[in-house]
Amino acid sequence: MSSGEQRLGFPAYARGDGSVGVRDLLLVLPTCVCAAQCALNIAASSDEAVSFYHQHGCAQLEFDRLQTARTLIGTGANPNVAAVLVVGLGCENVTAEEVAEGIAATGKPVAAIVIQEEGGTERAQVRGQNALRWLRSKAGRPERIPVALRHLVLGTECGGSDALSGLTANPVVGWVADQVVAAGGTVILSETTELIGAEHLVAARAASACAGESLLGAVRSVEEAIARTGVDLRGTQPAPGNIRGGLSTIEEKSLGCAHKAGTTPLREVVPYAARPGGSGLVFMDTPGHDVESVTGMAAGGTQVVLFTTGRGTPTGSPVAPVVKIATSDRLWSSMAPNLDFGAGGVAAGRETVAEAGRRLLHLTLDVAGGAPVKAETLGHREFAIYRLGPTV
C-alpha cells in the first residue's frame, strides 16, 4: 500500500460502542415470521426505515433458536443501524424482549412492541409508527465525521461464479482486502462449502495453529454433515449456473473463491453471525447460499459487502450496501442496472488486477461515504438465516 492509500478514509457515523456506520438506518426487526408483515407495514410509513421478511424465530430446536436470536441481535447491532424497533408476535421462541435487550447492549435506542399485547396488527402498526418517530428523536441526526480505513469491516461474497471469477473479480477484491487489512481494518471471507478443496491453502496462511485448524475443522464438519445425509454435494457445488459459466469442479470454484481473501494471514475463524474479536483477515463459517452468507456477515458487523458475480445477481441486504462486481465485460453490459463495478478489463488486458483494485477501493470508500449501490436503489433487502436443523 502506498503512503497515499494508507491515509485513505471515509465519512461515517460514530456509534456509542466505538464502531462507525456507513448508513444511518431505522430498522424494524421482526422476531418471527408471524410478525414480519406487520414490521414491513410499519417500516413503509417512514422513508428512513427498513425491514425484512424471514421465516424463523419459532418451532426451532434450541441450537437453531440460539442462532436465530444471535443473527437478529447482530443485525440490529450492525453499526449502519441508528435505532431499532423490535416487533414480536408474543408466543414465539425468540422473544421481542430477548432481541431488544441484546441490541440495547450496544447503547443504541431500542423499542419493542408485541402484536398480541397490542390487540392485533392494526393497533401494533399505529404503536410502531409512533415508536419510529420516538426512536429517530432519540437517535438524533448525526453528521458524518472523517474516519480512517481501519474502521472498515468489509464482507466478501461471490455468487453465480463463472470461469472468470478466479481470474478477474475475485483477485481484484483480494487486492482491496489486502489494502483494508494493511490499514488496520477487518475483512471477512465466508462460504465454507466454497472452500472445499482449497481450504489447505488458506489455512497455511493462518497466523496461528488454532486459526488454521479451526478453518480446516469447519470445512471438515460441513463435509461430514453432507455425507451423513447420503446426498452427493456435486450438483449443488458447482451449481448448474456455475457449470454453464465454465466451472467444472468444486475445487476449481473454491480456488477462485479463495482469491477474495487476498494474501494476508488468516487471523481468526468465527461462527455464523458472530463478531470478529479483532482486525485482519477473518473467516466466518457460513453456507454457500449467498443471502444466508451476507446475512451472517452483516450480523457480524460488516458495513459494506463486495459481491462478485459471473452470472449476475440482484440481491442486497437490509442493513449493509452490497457492491456488485461483474467478472466480464459481457455481464457488465448485459446486467448493468444491477451492477456497480466491472472487472472484465483484467481479462481483456486493459488493466491489471492492481489497477482495477484501486478503482474498486475508491468505489468502496465512496459507498462507505454514502453513495448508493444498485441493490439499494432497486430496493433489494434480502435476508435469510442459516438453519441447521428441521422445523419442529
Image (cartoon, grey):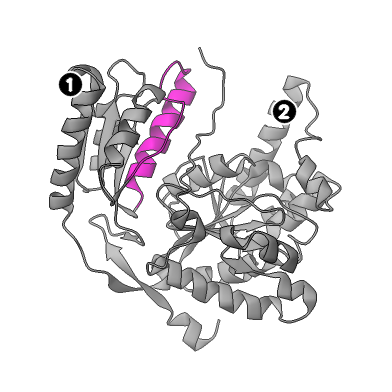
Reply above or below: 91 against 271: above
Q: Residue at x 43, y 53 (%)?
A: 320
Amino acid beneath label 2: Ile
**Percent position of residue 303, x then y:** 42, 57
Q: Examine the structure image and report whether residue 10 is included in the region drawn in magenta.
A: no
Q: Examine the structure image and report whether residue 75 is included in the region drawn in magenta.
A: yes
Looking at the rendered structure, the secondary structure element under dot 2 is: helix
**Percent position of residue 368, x then y:** 41, 66
Counting residues from the start of the chain, the first of labels 2 and 1 encountered is 1
For the N terminus, the quadrant is bottom right
- What range is drawn magenta here? 50-78
Q: Residue 184: tell me if it is visible.
A: no
Q: Name the residue beneath numbered marker 2.
A: 226
Q: Residue at x 68, y 70 (%)?
A: 343
- Seen as rendered, the residue at the extreme top is 392
What label does residue 118 carry, if any?
1
Left or right? Give the position of 113 relative to 275.
left
Q: How many residues crowd around disc 2 within 10 Å: few (fewer than 14), some, or many (20 or more)?
A: few
